[in-house]
Amino acid sequence: QVQPVESGGGLVQTGGSLRVSCAVSESIFRFTTMGWYRQAPGKQRELVATITSGGTTNYADSVKGRFTISRDNAKNTVDLQMNSLKPEDTAVYYCQMTSLSSFNYWGQGTQVTVSS
């Protein structure tokens, strides 16, 4: 059973930085797309950033220029570097991985809180 595990969330002030990481026990080459989503209280889960097995990235307009998604093939991790954080970035951040058979695996989430 594939289980992505997130880490690295926390509390930061406006303008600060955080890095969240997602790890799996299998090779990430098993997954066509890996990404980060977030869900704020009372809101729907939304896409933050994705990266394909070929390295193509995609970002939500709200985070472009501030967040960077990356993958480490040797460590089987996908990271999200978040800079210039704003209070509206406060949410639970979820890692998602899509397998070659198009099945989506989700992590349990990690809380990111940006204080004003």
Image: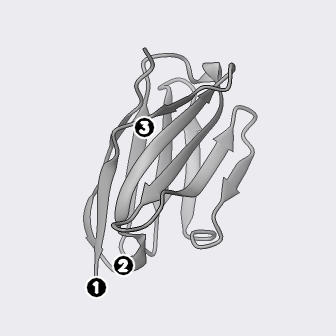
The residue pinned by badge 1 equals 116
What type is the residue that disc 2 sits on? Pro
Task: Say which quadrant the N terminus sits in.
Answer: top left
- Distance from label 2 to label 3 (Cα)? 23 Å
The mark found on residue 22 in the picture is 3
Q: Earlier in the sequence, mark 3 or mark 1?
A: 3
The reply to whether dot 1 and dot 2 touch (C-beta < 8 Å) is yes
- Residue at the farthest bottom position: 116
Label 1, secondary structure: give it: loop
The mark found on residue 87 in the picture is 2
Mark 1 Cα shell of 10 Å, populated few (<14), some (14-19), many (≥20): few
Residue depicted at x 45% and y 57%: 38
Left-right relation of 21 to 35:
left
Q: Nearest the camera: 82 or 46?
A: 46
Q: Earlier in the sequence, mark 2 or mark 3?
A: 3
From the viewer's perspective, is residue 8 above or below residue 29? Answer: below
Residue depicted at x 50% and y 26%: 76
